[in-house]
Amino acid sequence: MGDSVRLIEVKENVLDDNEKVAEALRARLKEEKTFLVNLMASPGAGKTTTVIQTTERLRESLKIGVLEADIDSMVDAEKVAATGITAIQMRTGGFCHLDATMVGDGLSAIGSEAYDLIILENVGNLVCPAEFDTGSAINAMILSVPEGDDKPLKYPLMFSVCDVVLINKIDACELFDFDRARFEEGVRKVNPTCPIFEISARTGEGIEAWVAWLREKTLAHNG
Amino acid sequence: MQYQDAINFCHGRSPSANVIIPRDEGWEHSQPAFKVAHLAAGGIFSQKQQEYPMHELPVMNGILKVVMKHAAMNNVSKVVAIQLQVGKLSDLEEKWMQHYFDYLTKGTVADGAKLEIEWGDVVMRCAGCEKEFTTEPGADNFGSCTHCGGQGGEILSGKEYYVKNMVAQ
């Protein structure tokens, strides 16, 4: 009759492939002295506005490039490019996050070695991007006040993989009953050490402290 | 039908490349971000069911790649079942995982293979006492150290997609 059924040991991690590509990318960027930041947040949290505020303050001292990733449209890249910063738009066409291979393509397209700092604005999504290593030096996420102070409890994975958290739209705290202490408590459950910066990308409040931290990290990485 | 074609089918657009990086001169470079072994048209990718395919798809494709590699290594003629460990922090749904997997495996040696999923615990290292503890996502006491009662720590385990074994002929 047919072959007998047997148990075959596999013992393999599914995301290993992406991990390998991500590690190789990190090593390459270290050699190129390019600091890659993977910026994640929900749609509308203020990623692009924060990117523009950030590049505005750092462009004098650092050569900055921006990789925009969206499901569709060139809106974000156009906004950034209008300020005079080189931006490349990647359109994923439905894919909900970036993986290391796609990021590698973007870096080659922008010519990453020419830059000190590259900000990768990931697809607006709190779920999938957390699972896929992009090869970045650090992960940053933005949580905007209107989204609510309970989000760390709902998206533990996202908050756990971030090296820094920005609370945006801090000028709207009262309007939305955002409890800063409750939010931090939720973050600390899964991330004991990441700094949390309160900013308003619209008014510019708090941006200086975030930018100073980012500049320090960039210079430390690039040596 | 390639992965991108499946997504475009979902949105009613004509097939186009996955990652488009526009250049000043209007030249577009594209490279498939994802290839799938085999994807059947229609059914699961109807517009009524959902707006975007969830990322069960790339993960299931990753599982398929691992399975096909080991099937080839072991002269497998048919994969009956695949024993997976998926961390509890994963947002994937069991039903959809099997659903997507069934479409990906049509015509391959893994056609009809059943996914047997063991949900891996979330293990953290306490920020306070540095001991490891298991904690349940979604529970009120999530992140509470069972040794010292302290809140929070580093996540050591709970986000994995791990193929343990396969049952095959």
Image (tube, grey):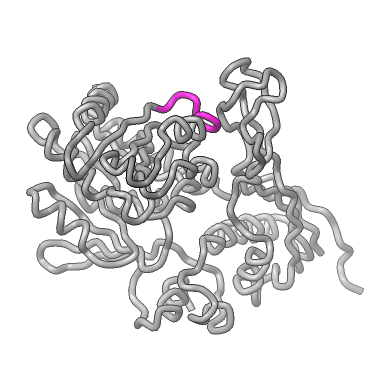
Q: Residue furthest top?
A: B129
Comparing A142 with B165, the one in front is: A142
How far across and down, in percent of the image, does residue B149 sit?
A: 66, 21
For the point 62% across and 17% down, the residue is B130
Res A5 visible: yes
For the point 73% across and 61% down, the residue is B115
Q: Would residue A191 be counted in the magenta stretch?
A: yes
How far across and down, in percent of the image, does residue B94 sit?
A: 68, 61
Q: How many marks?
A: 0
Q: Quadrant of residue A37?
A: top left
A59 left or right, relative to A127: left
A136 left or right, relative to B100: left
Q: Would residue B127 be counted in the magenta stretch?
A: no
B66 w.r.t. A34: above or below: below
Query: Considering the image in quadrants, where does the N terminus of chain A appear?
Result: bottom right
A3 w.r.t. A28: above or below: below
How far across and down, in percent of the image, does residue B27 sit?
A: 17, 68
Res A114 visible: no
**Magenta residues (range):** A188-194
B165 left or right, relative to B107: right
For the point 50% across and 29% down, the residue is A188
Q: Quadrant of residue A211?
A: top left
How far across and down, in percent of the image, does residue B10 sit?
A: 45, 78
Q: Residue furthest right?
A: A1
